[in-house]
Amino acid sequence: MNEYMTEEEIKELAAQLRCPTEDEICELMEDSNSFMISETLKKLSLGVGDVVMELGPGNGHHLKSILKTAKEAFIVDISDYTISAIGERYSKSVLEGKLKTILTDGVSIDIESGIVDKGFTVNTIYFWQDPISYLNEIGKVFKNDGEFFITFAHQDSVKDLPFVKYGFELYNEEKLQKLCEGSCFSVSELLLKTEKISSKIGEELQRDFVIAKLIKSS
Ligand SMILES: C[S@@+](CC[C@H](N)C(=O)[O-])C[C@H]1O[C@@H](n2cnc3c(N)ncnc32)[C@H](O)[C@@H]1O
């Protein structure tokens, strides 16, 4: 991961960020996105007995603390690799029926309707193929008044990174708000945060990111 990557390597990096097939990229994401994840988890403020869902967990190191508190956790991902790696890492919770791993095609989500209290997703919205339909599909699994947090890098911070031209749909606050207007969620809070990170190609940069809190309407 450095400034001398070829265009082919940058393209491959973009594909791995969209749908990881190996541990190395998941570890890299964990390093560079840990602040986004921990700030999202603070806002999520999980309570004992909550049923929680995460969409696109990457390597899922952060699931350890979630599994201590939640009654039940679902992770949903398009990556076979991610789903099986997390299933192995948390096999005890899977066996106990506390953690359910769900492979999605990015269109439908195979979870019973109306059972999730709280959910979150970090750095996945860029890859949603049909965002309004998918947001409504996600919404189905939530209880009424359930809370869903979408965390994403602000488009102004990342638009010039070389890999985003390969299939990333970038968002700002207005675009997110507009997306939600066509969905079963309403936006209750938009929080803008800033951090300094080393980018996936080795540059130092300031990254602004948004944590959007959505509420499922009846
Ligand atoms: C860039 S990684 C982010 C991982 C982690 N959340 C983080 O911030 O470090 C994107 C993750 O979302 C998953 N993903 C991509 N599109 C998805 C979709 N439509 N539904 C569910 N998961 C998706 C990928 O397989 C991957 O695990």
Image (spheres, rainbow, N blue to C red):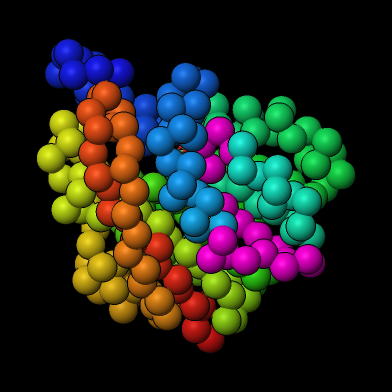
- Indicate whether 7 appears above or below 75: above
Q: Quadrant of ligand 1?
A: top left
- Residue 25 location, quadrant: top left
- Residue 72 location, quadrant: bottom right
Residue 166 visible at all: no
The residue range painted magenta reads: 42-60
Left or right: residue 107 versus residue 193 is right
Residue that protrudes farthest toward the right in the picture: 96
Q: Identify the residue at image location x=53%, y=43%.
A: 57
Residue 71 visible at all: yes
- Indicate whether 201 appears above or below 5: below
Residue 170 place in picture, x, y as percent: 22, 52
Q: Identify the residue at image location x=15%, y=45%.
A: 159
Q: Identify the residue at image location x=61%, y=43%.
A: 62
Pick the residue in front: 64 or 89: 64
- Indicate whether 57 appears above or below 21: below
Pick the residue in front: 183 or 67: 67
- Indicate whether 186 appears above or below 27: below
Residue 209 place in picture, x, y as percent: 32, 55
The stretch drawn in magenta includes residue 58 = yes
Pick the residue in front: 9 or 130: 9
Residue 177 place in picture, x, y as percent: 29, 73
Pick the residue in front: 209 or 119: 209
